[in-house]
Amino acid sequence: MKAEDFQADCKRVGGFKPSSIALAIAVASSVSAAVTAQEQLEIEEVIITATARPVTKMESSISVSALDTEELSNYAPRSTAEVFRSLPGIRAESSGGGGNANITVRGIPLATGGSKYMQIHEDGLPVLEYGDVNFGNTDNFIRADSSLSRIESVRGGSASTFASNSPGGVINMISKTGEEEGGNIGLSFGADYDETRLNFGYGHHLSDTLRFYVGGFLREGEGVRETGFDGDSGGQLKANLTKDFDNGYVRLYYKHLDDRVTTYLPGPVTYKGNGEFGTVANFDASSQTLHSDNYRNISTFDAYGNPVNRDLSDGIESLVEAYGFESQFEFENGWTITDKFRISDISGSFISPFTDTFGNYGPQSAQSMADLICANAVSGEGSAVDCSTGTTVTYANGGEVDELAYLNLLFDTEIHDLGLIVNDFKVDKLINDNIVVSAGFYYSKQNIKTSWNSWNALIQSVDGSDSQNLSITANANGDLLVDDGLWSASFLSYAWDLEYETYAPYMNVSFDVGDFTFDVSARHDMVNAKGSLVSSCCGGDTDYDINGDGIISDVEDASASDAFGFTGGIITMANGNTQLVDYDADNTSFSLGGNYAINDSMAVFARYSEGGRAIADRLLQISGALNSDGSLSDTTDGFDSVDQLEIGYKFTAGDFDIFATYFNTITEETNAEITSGLTFVREYEAQGIELEGSYIYGDFSVNGNLTWTDAEISKDANNPSVVGNTPRRQADIIYTITPQYNFGNSLTFGASLQGSTEYYVSDSNQLKQDGYVLVNLFGSYYVTEDLTVSFNVNNLTDEFVVTEVEESYAEAGDVVRGRAISGRSTSVSFNYAF
């Protein structure tokens, strides 16, 4: 895009003008007409998202918003999830780095992780059918790059019937398809952190009816936090080819993702009191991690007891090979047929240090950690260890330790297969120019084949990217309690091998009566689940020199007791416990909405919806949910439900837009949390108001959104004491405000203010994070028509904010385990358009 064109568009749409960017996205094949990029600017008030036919924003009874590629850099994102948190109503906790984010919408809870109730799509089809797979969050397998045209979100109950397993809404990442010829090549690098990234893209018309687009990125570096190694490494290539016909089009799609990012799990932080958290000695959880080049090479066992060597720098490894097909044709008498198909081969791994406590073993001085371990230790023969003369703790390579020590429970999971096959077929019929009847059939097959390697329990120093393994010896008889960091060779081991098939017929009827627009839709999801989970822990039949020192110590001896009194280091799969999975579940969703256009600039709408979300692999962690033969027990029907009422008001007047939506939501939750071992069988209630708007005055524009939520836990089968409390991490208000000023045609400068009021970090409502504002700066200078220099600053004021804390209570001065938003980081970019 040329500089003058971009400036003109900024003046026209204000950078982020909700009424002008509610454009076409294909949410579960709900698209009923192809719209080119040029046409979008001409009919920018027309939307075809989660509707049976194109209608204007003022005529629709849904909530939809979007970000285009020019806007993405305004939010100084360091991950795709950091882009999502700029969308109205979306709560995206991006403290995990380039993946492993927690995402939800409009007061729907985040009991654990992932995006359980909100689907993430690419070009109208889900990336994964289930967004909260253990260690397989959907955002692990998506990247925002030059191939992206825009990101759009549909929030609320209408998504329940236009996509499976999405009762809260859909975020859709839409690719460029070559309508606009030309391309770009860009180079960006961290000014105060180590990462270099190359972005590229190119679209071209091979003929009047044939066009293509190819784009992607390559990157290498340490990332925004100090790790001591290049943990962010890899890239993506996306391509599509479109053949246009007089009455439709056919498109082929390809995606290759091979990327690694460091993921940040909870680490030691200090609770200062009054909702404020901060650093501990030698460690800043917002700019450092407990990853270290000192112990990158990890030896462990897979779920079958076989030795495995792992590399800590792999972090979240994402491997995707996807092929897709899309077609849409219009026929005489008002018929339109749309079909979308994709097959994705998805695999990877997840490895990262987690700060555990095992009760009393939280972060503490190295000597007190050593004494505590000794006091509770058993010898190789199973008898108590003599600690009468104390203990000695040293670095594994020698030297006394005067730092905090922590228990690193090394999360180590290999993702063998998260492959997804999905197809969505839909037929629309236009009747008398005011009635549209739509019917479709959706099918998907989601594999979940992962193995949790034996999670080593390591004792290490708390020292940012220079953390080291510690050795601990009981002085009385010289028992080696911790051998080169290794306290226990195994904690647990799982092997998941599951397959979920979804069949979903759906139907929608929409019609106009004067200034009224109505629609009613229904969807019936049928899920067939098969497979098994084999779990094993803490026993075995093989000696293994895990640390490679040539000596089999007690913690490596299969015939000896480990730190927990179990014999051996790992159990073979033959001795594990097997839970079969073999059940069918179904759910019917419906949505009813209506809109009244008061005049050309004002409208009101209302919608009521009941939607469902199938419970996938986490159901196996709920005690008693499945019978021994794999069938569902009487305690669950295999689905969680979300009921929503929405009432909205829309107003647009030239350079000013405002949209307000009241929502009332009741959510069922059946879930399990790995880190605490807790299970949740609950109901939540929430109500609130979502606002979004924009204003343009000459070269100045401001846009923003704010969501107020009043939420509570209304039922809890396992812990009635939390009933009436505010759900964890649910703030009363979250908001994003983005002012921007264009200095002629050569310079753009602005800021993004992303804030939250205080919130409780646990359901007990005893410990809270104070409110905060993150300030992000952005600016672009157009050296020539084609060459642009840009910068952005993320978290300018270097705020220390935790999104989650493992502990539910703490006194001022206590060390707890929290996951912090990354501190200040600055990037500089050069982009050449051609």
Image (cartoon, helix red, strand yellow):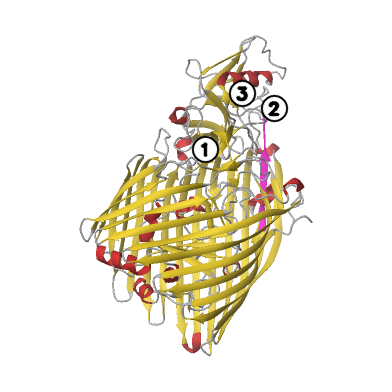
Q: Position of residue 515 (x, y in %)?
A: 54, 84
- Residue 555 shows which numbered tag? 3
Q: Earlier in the sequence, mark 1 or mark 2?
A: 1
Chain part drawn in magenta: 529-539
The residue that appears at 62% across and 61% down in the rendered structure is: 501
What residue is pinned by disc 1?
352
692 above or below 373? below
Q: Position of residue 453 (x, y in %)?
A: 58, 38
The residue that appears at 42% across and 38% down in the rendered structure is: 225
Q: Nearer the viewer, mark 1 or mark 2?
A: 1
- Element on which disc 3 rests: helix
Q: Nearer the viewer, residue 52 or 796?
A: 796
Disc 3 residue crowd, few under 14, some 14–19, many 20+, Cα 10 Å: many
Q: Position of residue 542 (x, y in %)?
A: 62, 28
Quadrant of the frame with the C terminus: bottom left
- Element on which disc 1 rests: strand
- Residue 566 shows which numbered tag? 2
